[in-house]
Amino acid sequence: MSAAILGAAVFAAQVMLAAAMGCAALRLAWGPRAQDRVLALDTLYVNAAMLLLVFGIRSGSTHYFEAALIIALLGFVATAALAKFLMRGEVIEQ
């Protein structure tokens, strides 16, 4: 019984994360300002990392956890670079 509940919960989590990624992709495409697009990109990478973690739970493979960690690290750096670009107009100061 608990395996069936876990399987249903994992499937529901995958569906909800996929819907959240779809909403974030729409905001990324139709965002009226650059700040909205950066926030949508931040939300998109967080949802992608969580979806990979749920896939890892479902399959029992550790490769998904490593991929989620890489996505989280690269997403954080990208968000910081985009925020600095929006604030100052350049990423690398000379």
Image (tube, rainbow, N blue to C red):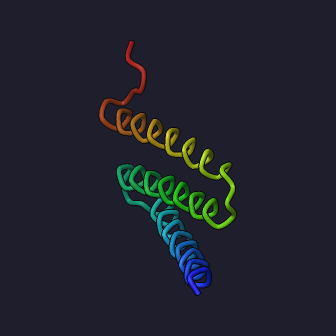
Q: Dividing the image into 4 quarters, which one contains the C terminus?
A: top left
Rendered view: 18 above or below 82: below
Residue at the (56%, 77%) spot, across then down: 6
Q: In x, y percent, where is residue 72? A: 50, 45
**Extreme residue toward the top, this view:** 94
Along the viewing direction, whichever of 51 and 21 lies nearer the viewer: 51
Residue at the (57%, 49%) spot, across then down: 68
Q: In x, y percent, where is residue 23? A: 48, 70
Q: In x, y percent, where is residue 69? A: 54, 44
Along the viewing direction, whichever of 69 and 59 lies nearer the viewer: 59
Q: Dividing the image into 4 quarters, which one contains the N terminus?
A: bottom right
Rendered view: 78 above or below 6: above
Location of residue 55 (image quadrant): bottom right
**Extreme residue toward the left, this view:** 87
Along the viewing direction, whichever of 15 and 87 lies nearer the viewer: 15
Location of residue 82 (image quadrant): top left
What number of labels is visible? 0
**Extreme residue toward the front, this view:** 1
Q: In x, y percent, where is residue 64? A: 64, 52
Rendered view: 67 above or below 61: above
